[in-house]
Each structure stands twice: as structure tokens, then as C-alpha cells.
Amino acid sequence: MKIGILALQGAVREHAQMLEALNCEVVLVKEVQHLPQLDGLILPGGESTAMRKLLERGQLLEPIRDAISNGLPVFGTCAGLILLAREVIGQESHFAVMDIVVERNSYGRQIDSFEVELPVKHIDDDVKAVFIRAPHIVEVGKDVEVLATFEGKIVLARQQHMLGCAFHPELTTDLRLLRYFVEKVVAM
């Protein structure tokens, strides 16, 4: 199975290591020609505004939006969640493909980063969640399934072939969330 990672900025290496541990072939997506060969795509954490500029400069914004709209399974983590959102409070949306509203930097600045154990729907036992300048989901559409919350805020959700989380599963050794993406979302 070929899983691409948007490799413009952010936690690319960490996602690649986890996907390789799950026996996935990793494709570092930097150009449009990488998209047709993919079974799924990871939008890693990083800085969403910088990623938007790099997506536009590389002429990737529309092709990735089209690929996701046409069913390419996608997993957005932190900034990747922001990229997926239909609406971003106080900012222009990016791909605008997932029926969610997101607010950036919901848990403070980088110095306020933290880890917690979260119960996640469809996964046995709690998942370690690393929050770094994390967003949260303010509102979900009727076809969006909430998979995890923290302190009353939605931090993980799925809509059909799209999975988005506010935290960084790639900064832990726990493969379960990436396995969920590969087994459940990509296998749809």
C-alpha cells in the first residue's frame, strides 16, 4: 500500500517511520505527479499558513483538493486538520473538504505543549496525544463522526475517507491511530 506524506514542511520523517513500521510504502509528496499513485495521503503537522504558501507555490493546492474530493483517503494531523477544514475561524480555508469548523492555537503557545492519554472511539485503550499549539474542532457537519474529545473540545473526527486530529500521533511510539487510518479509512 502506497501512502503519501505531504513533504513541504512539518513532521514528515516521523510519519514516514510509523508508516514503514506498518509495512506501507511511503511516497514523499512534493509534486503533482506523485498523487495518482497513492492509496492514501497524510497531511502532517507544521504551520498551516506556511504550508498554504508552499502548496500554492508548488501548484499543489487544487490538485490535492481535487484528489481528496474524488475519494483519496487523507489523514490530517494538527496543521493537516486545519488544511482539511471547511472553515477556519479568522482565516481563509485551505482545502475546505471536511465538513468541520476549526479554531487554531486552542491550547496556547508552543511553551504550553503537553501530552495526555485520550480514549478514542474504535481503538482499545487510551491513545497518547501530544498537543503542540494545537487546534480543535468547533463544529462538525451531520456526516462527521467525533472520535475523541479533550476538555469538552473535539480533537479527532472522521468523515468518510477523511480523518483529522488536533494532536500529533507521530510523536509517540503508538501506531494504533495510523493503523486505524490505513486499515479502516484507506480500505473503504
Image (tube, rainbow, N blue to C red):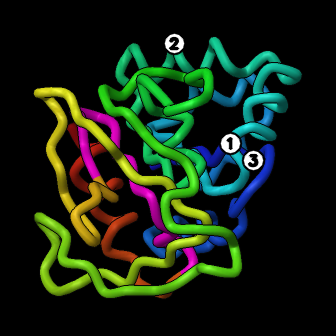
Label 3 secondary element: loop
Residue 118 in magenta?
A: no
The span from disc 2 to disc 1 (Cα, nearest Å) is: 19 Å
Sequence-earlier tag: 2 or 1: 1
The span from disc 3 to disc 1 (Cα, nearest Å) is: 13 Å
Q: What's the amino acid at mark 1?
A: Ser
The disc placed on residue 7 is 3
Q: Residue 54: horizontal and vertical position, in percent? A: 83, 32
The residue that disc 2 covers is 66
Relative to 66, does residue 181 appear above or below in the rendering?
A: below
Is label 2 in contact with label 1 (beta carbons under 8 Å)?
Answer: no
Location of residue 22 by image quarter: bottom left
Sequence-earlier tag: 2 or 3: 3
The residue that disc 1 covers is 48
User: In this rendering, does residue 32 appear at all?
Assistant: yes
* Residue at the spot 50% in from the left edge and 31% down from the top edge: 88
Sequence-earlier tag: 3 or 1: 3
Q: What's the amino acid at mark 2?
A: Asp
Location of residue 158 by image quarter: top left
* Residue at the spot 61% in from the left edge and 64% down from the top edge: 133
Residue 169 in magenta?
A: yes
Foreground mark, 2 or 1, reads 1
Relative to 100, does residue 172 appear above or below in the rendering?
A: below
Foreground mark, 3 or 1, reads 1
Label 1 secondary element: helix
The span from disc 2 to disc 3 (Cα, nearest Å) is: 18 Å
Q: Residue 187: horizontal and vertical position, in percent? A: 25, 43
Q: Residue 74: horizontal and vertical position, in percent? A: 43, 39
* Residue at the spot 49% in from the left edge and 58% down from the top edge: 106
